Amino acid sequence: MSAPVLRVENLVKTYGQGDARVRALRGVSMDIAQGDYVAIMGASGSGKSTLMNILGCLDIPSSGRYLIDGTDVGGLDEHQLAILRNRKIGFVFQSFNLIPRMSALANVELPLTYGGVGAAERRRRAMEALEQVGLADRVHHEPNELSGGQQQRVAVARALVTSPALLLADEPTGNLDTHATGDVLAILDGLSKEGSTIVLITHEDDVAAHTGRVIRLVDGQITEDVRR
Amino acid sequence: MNQLEILRFALRGLLANKLRSFLTTLGILIGVAAVILLVAVGEGSSRSITENIQRLGANTLTISPQFSGGGGGGGGAGGAGGPRAQARTLTLEDAKALTDRAQAPSVRSVSPVVTAGQAAATYQGASHDVQQLVGTYPSYFEATNKPVARGAYFFNDDVVNARKVAVIGQTVATELFGDEDPVGRPLALSGVPFTVVGVLKASGSSGGQDADDVVIAPLPAVRQSLTGFGSLGSIVVQATGSGATTTAQAEITAILNQRHGVTGTRTADFRILNQATLQETVSAATGTFTVLLAAVAAISLLVGGVGITNIMLVTVTERTREIGIRKAIGAPRSAILGQFLLEATLLSLVGGLAGVAVAFAGTRFTIAGIEPVLVPSSVALALGVSVGIGLFFGSYPANRAAKLRPIQALRHE
């Protein structure tokens, strides 16, 4: 088996000071290998969102090591982190987080723009990604002209357009109806079959059922790690 | 990350809020236009004043008698304040002494002047009260910058022979002769017959006095028939060049001091008005005036700059979430900084350019009787300052945006 895409060792995250101190993560260690399709499950307050933010390099752990594609994230400065987020990670949020007043195409092109890809290449890859999520006919619509499910599919296209090493999805179906949930999960399933490494957070068992590995978090610690 | 892309983001950001961008731009526009326009008005007024002074004659010194001082005229002989001899008036001999090449090498011409205020001029029943009747030498015309439009000056010969000829101003010409050509026609001044030989070019009114309401005749003729052989009203001296006015003034002072017996403790009984120093004083005053105007305008520019900071801060707060998204998908700090800095600079640059356009249009009109004169350096300065203001006042909000932690920005509602 090749080197893990993602390795965390004894990750701890605490918020606040003194009595108000909250320990969101209390020593989490895990490896995620190339091609894994992982669901992180847990009740609200179990620390799963905190873990996700750290994995997405949006937040910094209080202690512990975090390696992505063999690179120790702890040693990177802000600029390098930005590059890492841009190249290695694709993030799908629960609330879509598309930029308003920008067309779907422009939203999908955005990571490539920050990555310094030329205009023609950018457009081609963005179109490809949008096609992949089945929105080739909606490229010039702005987010407010799209349904929730369509917005989330645009967000998925934006996450995968850079061909990241890791696709992180934070409750991607949390704001969607059953039909749209099915659409989005089908896309993720397809990506997984093509070999993408996907980590998604959910508290719904039927979403977790799509994945090949379920990690359960309780009070900031891993209590269960099951492969199927 | 391409600079052009950052520019596109900035433009898109500005266009998303058109009204707000427009109003912010307006602040800078008003500031820049005010700076350029007010400086132009200051410059215009300064030039028109300088022109007015120059119209009085270039490089000229006007000597006039001065009777005020310690003695208070002739009576108070016992006054300890200023012991001085009986104040002497200016005489033709004084004027002649000034033409001495050896003692006054900087003097080019000397024109003794007598004036008779208010003389009634009549021609074939038409009558006009002339404001200023001047008796002098032909050099007066050049010294005081009074060219003729029609006819000619009178000559030294006319002076020597005390011929009753006169050069009249434009106002006198129209009042008395209407459309007729006055040259060669008779003109009665307080009943004394003169012949018109020339008409002066119109020079316009200055300081409420109509400079064209004037009759100029040879000195002896005026003295004989109108004023009598008393003292001179003044002596107009033209210096040899613009650099020589100060030396000429010193030479004249020396000669007149000697002739009038003015020594150390005695107060001079004449004063010399130097056109050049007058001009210097006036331009210093108008310079201050222009600076004052510019300062007021600069404050409005500054206020515009604060407006930019304000609106950019609002924008950054409003778009915190967007900044978070951009950061989450890998926007480096420099791209965020660049985008917001560019937005601020674009606002001020567009405002500045529009301000320059407004100012260019504005200077085509006469403002408060002054024709504004565009000063190119003020345009460059105002434009430069407005861009600088965008950079300076935009840097704080832009920095705040760039420094946002992605996770905090994303959680912002």
Image (tube, coloured by chain):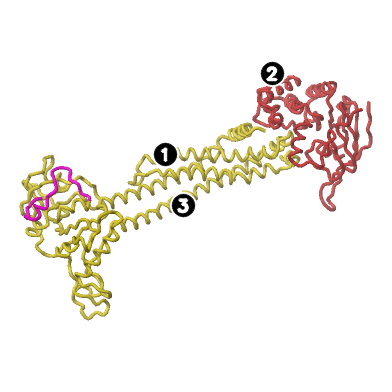
Chain colours: A red, B yellow
In the image: residue A124, left or right of residue B75: right
Seen in the picture, residue B148 relative to A70 is either above or below; the reply is below
Circle 3 sits on which residue? B295
- Residue at 87% x, 24% y: name it: A210
Instruction: Depth check: give the residue in front, B384 or B401.
Output: B384
Query: What label sits on residue A137 in the rendered view?
Result: 2
Q: Is residue A172 visible?
A: yes
Subunit that carries the residue with mark 2: A
Q: Earlier in the sequence, mark 3 or mark 1?
A: 3
Instruction: Depth check: give the residue in front, B65 or A25.
Output: B65
Name the amino acid, label 3.
Answer: Ala
- Share a chain, discs 2 and 3? no
Circle 1 sits on which residue? B360
State the image coordinates of residue B226 (x, y, percent, origin top left).
9, 58
In the image: residue A58, left or right of residue A138: right
Tell me if mark 2 has few (under 14), some (14-19) or many (20+) residues whose alpha carbon lies within 10 angstroms of its own: few
Name the amino acid, label 2.
Answer: Asp
Tell me if mark 1 has few (under 14), some (14-19) or many (20+) residues whose alpha carbon lies within 10 angstroms of its own: some
Instruction: Depth check: give the residue in front, B114 or A109.
Output: B114
In the image: residue B261, left or right of residue A89: left
State the image coordinates of residue B175 (x, y, percent, origin top left).
14, 46
The answer for how far apart the CA atoms under marks 2 and 3 are is 58 Å
Seen in the picture, residue A46 relative to B262 is either above or below; the reply is above
Residue stretch rendered in magenta on the structure: B145-165
The answer for how far apart the CA atoms under marks 1 and 2 are is 50 Å
